[in-house]
Every structure is written in C-alpha cells, then in structure tokens.
Image (cartoon, rainbow, N blue to C red):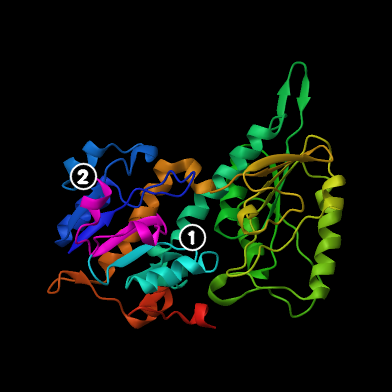
Amino acid sequence: MKIAILKEQAAGERRVAGTPETVKKFIALGASVAVEAGAGATASIADDAYAAAGASVGDRAATLAGADILLGVQGPDPASLGGAAAGAWIVAGLNPFGERARVDAYAAGGYEALAMEFMPRITRAQSMDILSSQSNLSGYKAVLDAAAEYDRAFPMMMTAAGTVSAAKCFVMGVGVAGLQAIATARRLGAQVSATDVRAATKEQIESLGAKAIFVEKVAGIEGEGTGGYATEMSDEYKAAQAELVSSHIAKQDIVITTALIPGRPAPRLISDAQIASMKPGSVIVDLAVEQGGNVEGAVAGEVVVRHGVRIVGHRNVPSRLAADTSALFSRNLYNFLSAFWDKEKNAPVLDEEIGNAIRLTQGGKVVNERLLG
C-alpha cells in the first residue's frame, strides 16, 4: 500500500495533506509513504523532515508511481495524476458542488474520489471532520484580520490620558468558526454578541460570555438542518431577523459573518443599507465570501471600503495559518484511513455509513447520491 502526499497546485494554497507526524503513523500501519518534493515548504515543513520520518521524497512522477492512495488538501488536477495505481483513491477536500467537472474527470480516469467535506456529522467521525478543524482556526484568524484592519483597540483601557472604550464585536453564524471567533474576540477584550438561526446555539453563545441576539416569537422555526448544519429559513423569519440585525448592527464596530449552507450559495446576512448604518472605520469580515458571501459588496480576495466600512474578503482563510491547519488536516486524514485499516489486507476497507457518504466516484461512474440528485 503506497500513500502519496502531493504538493498543492491551487493558487494561494499553502497547506499540505501530510506531516512528518502522520507519515510515521502511516508507516507504522504498514504503508509506504511518498512525498512530492516541496509539498510542505509553505507550511514550514522541509523535505528533510519527511525523509527523517521515513518517507521517500521525489518529483511528482516518482511520488505518483504505483500509488494506491493520493492525499491532498484540495482536489488535484486529474490530468496531473498519471502513473497512479488503477482505481487509486483520491482523499482530499474536493469541493464536489463547485468542481463537478473535476469530479466527472476523476470518474472517467477510474479513480475512487473521497470528498472529506462530505464526512457525516456523527460522533465516531468527529476526528475525521476537516470542515470543523479548518473552520476552528478560520474563526480565530477572522478576529485577527478584523483587529488588523480596525484602527482602534479591542479591549477597554484606562489610562492617565483617559479611557479607551472596548470594541463591540458581533458574530453572525455560530458554528465552529463562529464559536472560535466569539472566544477569540473575548480574549482580546471586546464586548461580544452573536446570533444564529439555530435556537440550540443560544446556550453555547452565553457559555462563552457573549450576549445572544435572537429573533423571538417566530414560532416553530429552529433552523436546524441535517447533520447539525443550518438550513434555509422562512420569509417570516428572514424579515424578523433583518429587523433585529439592522437595529443591532448599527452599534457594532466589528462584524464577523460565518454562515454557510452546504451545496447552496451563502445566505445574504448584511445588506448595503445595513453597512451604511455602521460607523466609519468599522470592519466586517466575511468568511463565506468564496461561496457568494454573506455581505453585500464583499469581494473575494480583497478588502473593500463601502460607506467608510472595511469589508474583508480573504480567500482560503485556513491557508493563512498553514502550519497549524496542515497539522490538523493531516490528522483528520490519518484518523479517517486508520479507522478503517484492515491489517490482513494492509489497506483501508470502508463501511457503508461513512463510505457511501463521502465516496463520489467508483468504477468509472459518479455514485454519490448528493451529486446524482
């Protein structure tokens, strides 16, 4: 069983899908590991560290030659995978809805593509969940990005020259990223409030010392979709939420939006009129900008100014903390493969619950129900 760790080809991607730590663990399972030269350079991992861990380091052709499992952060270009074993697994974040043509090409090439972002939200798969591990650090980085753009201090400071007021930070969307954003903003000394369409998150917000801002008296709307994700809300709820948010957002210095609905464009949370109501110098960080954005006027890859408010739309936020996000991503991949490792076959054998959830292609066809539906 040969596992190949590929160098990422996507523009701006600094993460890597394997570390010396996980290389050692894969070798202990009985696999051989090949790493493409330079794969870890942008995540502060030298080729020598992989070699010391027991991996062979070489060019892409040598790395792919006969490989049974190809590990990546983002889905590799199908045309760049020549030499891999027939039916090789591609294990990565494959963006199945956004890159459907690439998924079709994996099928045509005979690869078995496994999309790690389709990992079911069940207890035994928590350690395999790349969305959670990467979102956690994204929420942290969003607050630091906001602090970098905000031209005032976050904490209240009492000085001989007078008092500096604490920044007011509002987090919209309280998933993994939102919860970490709340915790980080609190650590920096901001006054933090947060909202979500899922009523169950109110207790989580308050447990972190933030104020929960929730729509009241809109009966029967919980916003909880399958697997713990948010779902699309009713028009009645949207109207009530917009009114509540409009009155609250005008008083905020920092707003961080994190709302995503799998397989659909990001919901619009902040309108241009709401941006105009904020004080000049305020900052909005849109973590959903690559999926269409939660904020009207946000531009992927740019920091734009509207009505005196800075709107931060950095792409691929996890990649901005490449060393730590690579370590967590790599452990997710190892936890996944090792959980199904069959010692007799010296290969992983997936069960139906997880295998059917994440498998996109098999036997030359696209087989995942979420893509066929």
What x and y, as percent, mark residue 99?
51, 64
Q: Quadrant of the N terminus?
A: bottom left
Given residues 40 and 196, the one toward you in this image is 40
**Count the marks: how many?**
2
Where are the magenta residues, as a range?
A: 59-84
**Outermost residue toward the top?**
160
Q: Nearer the viewer, mark 1 or mark 2?
A: 2
**Residue found at x 79% / y 66%:** 215
Q: Name the N-terminal-most of marks 1 and 2.
A: 2
**Residue found at x 17% / y 40%:** 52
What x and y, as percent, mark residue 257?
67, 53
Task: Residue type at mark 2: give it.
Answer: Val
Position of 145 with respect to 152 (left or right) is left
- What secondary structure is found at the residue carrying circle 1? helix
Q: Which mark is residue 131?
A: 1
Given residues 265 and 110, the one toward you in this image is 110
What x and y, as percent, mark residue 167?
73, 37
**Residue found at x 77% / y 53%:** 296
Query: Which residue in the structure is indicated by mark 2?
Result: 57
Magenta residue check for 159: no
Position of 144 with respect to 363 (left or right) is right
Disc 1 and disc 2 in contact, CB within 8 angstroms: no
What x and y, as percent, mark residue 363?
32, 80
Does residue 302 appear in the picture of this structure? yes
Q: Quadrant of residue 258?
A: bottom right
The 10 Å Cα crowd at callout 1, few under 14, some 14 to 19, many 20 or more, is: some
- What secondary structure is found at the residue carrying circle 2? strand
**Residue found at x 41% / y 49%:** 9
Alpha carbons under labels 1 and 2: distance apart: 29 Å
Q: Is residue 366 above or below residue 323?
A: below
The 10 Å Cα crowd at callout 2, few under 14, some 14 to 19, many 20 or more, is: many
**Outermost residue toward the left?**
344
